[in-house]
Image (cartoon, grey):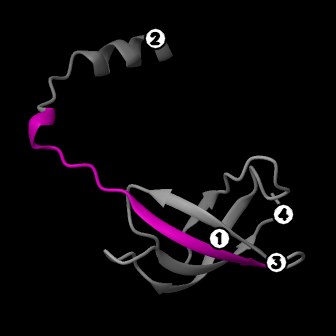
């Protein structure tokens, strides 16, 4: 089933000449337990209630789910966006 779905997507023509990829960088300050901060890169802007899996190799938060509870600012040309988040138990 998965192979058939993969083949179907291969047949869809895509004009990549008009696609512009944007990466948003955020500095997330984590609360609860040991406080720390992580960088998060995304193709879309974050919002209050957004969730993502933390990627910080070698750190105890690596692979944990994070929920944004307060978005302070979005990224600008001068620096990353700022947000506060909590690690989830799952």
Relative to 76, residue 22 above or below: above
For the magenta stretch, what is the residue range?
16-31
Relative to 6, residue 32 above or below: below
Which mark identifies residue 3?
2
Q: Residues within 10 Å of mark 2 (few under 14, many from 20)?
A: few
Q: Which residue is mark 4?
A: 89
Q: Which residue is mark 3?
A: 35
Q: Can the viewer see residue 1 in this picture? A: no
Q: Which residue is mark 1?
A: 67
Q: Residues within 10 Å of mark 1 (few under 14, many from 20)?
A: some
**Residue at coordinates 68% horizontally, 65% vertically from top-left?**
66
Quadrant of the rendered structure where residue 45 is? Answer: bottom left
**Residue at coordinates 56% horizontally, 75% vertically from top-left?**
49
Q: Nearer the viewer, mark 1 or mark 2?
A: 1
Quadrant of the rendered structure where residue 40 is? Answer: bottom right
Q: Which x, y percent locates residue 4?
A: 40, 11
**Residue at coordinates 34% horizontally, 12% vertically from top-left?**
7
C-beta proximity under 8 Å, tags 1 and 2: no
For the residue labelled by badge 4, is the local secondary structure a helix, a strand or a loop? Answer: loop
């Amino acid at each position: 089933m998965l192979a058939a779905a993969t083949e179907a997507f291969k047949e869809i023509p895509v004009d990549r000449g008009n696609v512009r990829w944007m990466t948003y960088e955020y500095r997330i300050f984590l609360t609860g337990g040991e406080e720390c901060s992580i960088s998060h890169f995304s193709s879309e802007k974050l919002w209050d209630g957004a969730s993502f899996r933390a990627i910080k190799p070698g750190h105890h938060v690596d692979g944990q789910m994070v929920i944004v509870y307060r978005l302070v600012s979005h990224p600008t040309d001068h620096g990353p966006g700022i947000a506060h988040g909590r690690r989830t138990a799952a």
